[in-house]
Image (cartoon, rainbow, N blue to C red):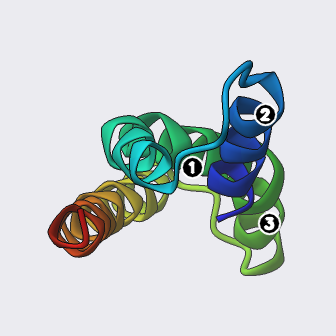
Amino acid sequence: MTSIVGHVAIQRCRAYKEWDQEEALRDVCRNFKGFYSDVKDMFKKDVLPKIMSRVADTSRETWDKVVTALDKTGSALENFVTGTLGRNK
């Protein structure tokens, strides 16, 4: 969510015309994959290594399973966000 809010805030601040909520919703739907990719990358780089070391499991198999779960979560979130926000247009 932080990535989404940050991107939308930047878009809103860069606007030379009046901010349009409908356009912002379309932008969030259109850019969700990129937003989630930012979050996933931060998690993989900053959080996951610390978790793996704390549970004493740094195997590639476990890492791959966590990344697969993140990918599936991203797909589910994308379907939810684009479906929910898309219906509110």
Q: Nearer the viewer, residue 58 or 73?
A: 73
The nearer-to-camera label among 1 and 3 is 1
The quadrant of the image that shows the N terminus is bottom right
Q: Indicate which disc residue 10 carries.
A: 2
32 with respect to 35 (left or right)? left
Residue 16 percent coordinates (x, y): 74, 18
Q: Residues within 10 Å of mark 2 (few under 14, many from 20)?
A: few
Q: What number of labels is visible?
A: 3
Tell me the distance, in whole angstroms, between the alpha carbons under discs 2 and 1. 20 Å
Q: Residues within 10 Å of mark 3 (few under 14, many from 20)?
A: few
For residue 56, which quarter of the picture? Answer: bottom right
Q: Amino acid at mark 2?
A: Ile
The nearer-to-camera label among 2 and 1 is 2
Assign a secondary structure to mark 2.
helix
Tell me the distance, in whole angstroms, between the alpha carbons under discs 1 and 3. 18 Å
**Disc 2 and disc 3 in contact, CB within 8 angstroms:** no
70 with respect to 81 (left or right)? right
Placement of 66 over or under 45, stated as above or below: below
Q: Nearer the viewer, residue 43 or 53?
A: 43
Q: Which residue is mark 3?
A: 53
Q: Amino acid at mark 3?
A: Ser
Q: Residue at x 34, y 45 (%)?
A: 26
The quadrant of the image that shows the C terminus is bottom left
Residue 60 percent coordinates (x, y): 47, 47
Q: Amino acid at mark 1?
A: Lys
Nearer the N terminus, badge 2 or badge 1?
2
Residue 30 percent coordinates (x, y): 32, 37
Residue 36 percent coordinates (x, y): 49, 49
Which residue sits furthest front?
Answer: 18
Q: Which residue is mark 1?
A: 40
